[in-house]
Image: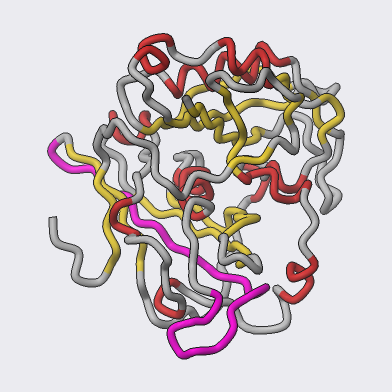
Amino acid sequence: MRCPSAICYESQSRTQFGSATRASRGPFMRGSAGRAVAGLLVFAAGLMIDPVWALADQAPPLVAADVVFKEPVGSLPGLYPFEAARNGLGGQGVVACTIRSDGAITACRTRSETPIGSFFGLASEAMGQRLRVATRGAAGESVVGRQIVLSFGFRSENGASTVALQTASTLASLPDPSDRKLLPVSSDDVKWVRPIDGRKVEALYPQGARQRGVSGFGLTSCEVADDGLLFDCRPVAAYPAGFGFDGAAAVAMTASKAKIGSVTTTGEATAHRRIGLLVIFKS
C-alpha cells in the first residue's frame, strides 16, 4: 500500500514488541519481579511530574510534519479497533499530546473522533504515545514541552485494515469533540483511588504468548461505576493479533477491582463514562 501523503502503519501480526515500549507503574500495585510482567503504557503520564509540561500552551501546536521521529514510524504497530475492522468501518482520530524533555510523546488526549463511539480516538492515543521525536524539530527549533496534534486515518477495505498518521503541514485550529461525554475519559485526567493490581494482570498473561516469549499489549475500555469501580471492560484492540492480549487486558482490569475518583482533574464527573487503558504484557 502506498501512502504519498501519510506515514503508514500496516495492521499485521509480529512476534516482537517494538523497542519504543514505555511502561509506567503509576496506577499499578507492584507485581513480582523477574517474571513476565504487565504494565500500563504512559496513558497514566498525568501521575508523573515533568516541569516542561507547563510550556505546552505557550505556542501553537505542532503537527507530524514539524518534528523528526526517532524511529521509523512505519515500523510501529497500528491499533485498529476490532469492532470497526469487523464492520468495515473507517474514520479518524485526532489527539493532542505533549513532547517531553526526552522526546517521548505523552499525555495524549482525544480531541475528535469520527465516527463517535468507534474508539478511533482511544486507539490514536495509544499509538501517539508510542512515538518518540528528536528534541529539535524539522526547522531546528526546540520542541520540548510543545503540544503536538496527531491525526490518524483508519481505513478498512476488502478485509484489510490500515492506519495512517497524517502528515499535513498546517492545522488551522485544534478541533474539539462535538460531545465529550460520548468519548472515553483519559486516564491522564483521573485520580486512582485504588490502584490496578499488577499481580492479577500478570496472572492473566496469555499462556500461549508466555510460552513463546511473545510480548504485546491489549487496549481495553471500561465503564466507571457510581463508586468509581471499573467494570464492563471490553477488548478494543491488540498487538500482535491472535494471542489474546485484548481479552486478557479486559479481564485483568475487571479482576483488579481498581477505582478512580468521582471527578477528573478538569472537574468532569467520571461516573457512567468509559475509560481507556492500554495494558502491556512483556515477557
Name the quadrant containing residue 25.
Answer: top right
Up-down relation of residue 5 to residue 89 (above or below): below
Quadrant showing the N terminus: bottom left
Q: Position of residue 65 (x, y in %)?
A: 40, 77
Residue in the picture at 60% in, 55% down: 108
Residue 270 horizontal side relative to residue 208, left or right: right
Up-down relation of residue 181 to residue 51 (above or below): above
Residue in the picture at 44% in, 13% down: 206
Residue 18 visible somewhere in the drawing: yes
Residue in the picture at 43% in, 30% down: 216
Up-down relation of residue 236 to residue 91 (above or below): above
Residue 96 horizontal side relative to residue 166, left or right: right
Residue 155 visible somewhere in the drawing: no
Q: Is 157 within the magenta?
A: yes
Q: Position of residue 247 (x, y in %)?
A: 47, 17
Task: Name the one closer to the observer, 59 or 132.
Answer: 132
Q: Give the number of callouts.
A: 0
Up-down relation of residue 268 to residue 248 (above or below): below
Q: Position of residue 34 (x, y in %)?
A: 59, 22
Residue 263 horizontal side relative to residue 151, left or right: right
Magenta stretch, residue numbers: 135-158
Q: Is 71 within the magenta?
A: no
Question: Which colour style is shown?
Answer: secondary structure
Name the quadrant containing residue 253.
Answer: top right
Q: Position of residue 225 (x, y in %)?
A: 77, 22
Residue in the picture at 79% in, 71% down: 54
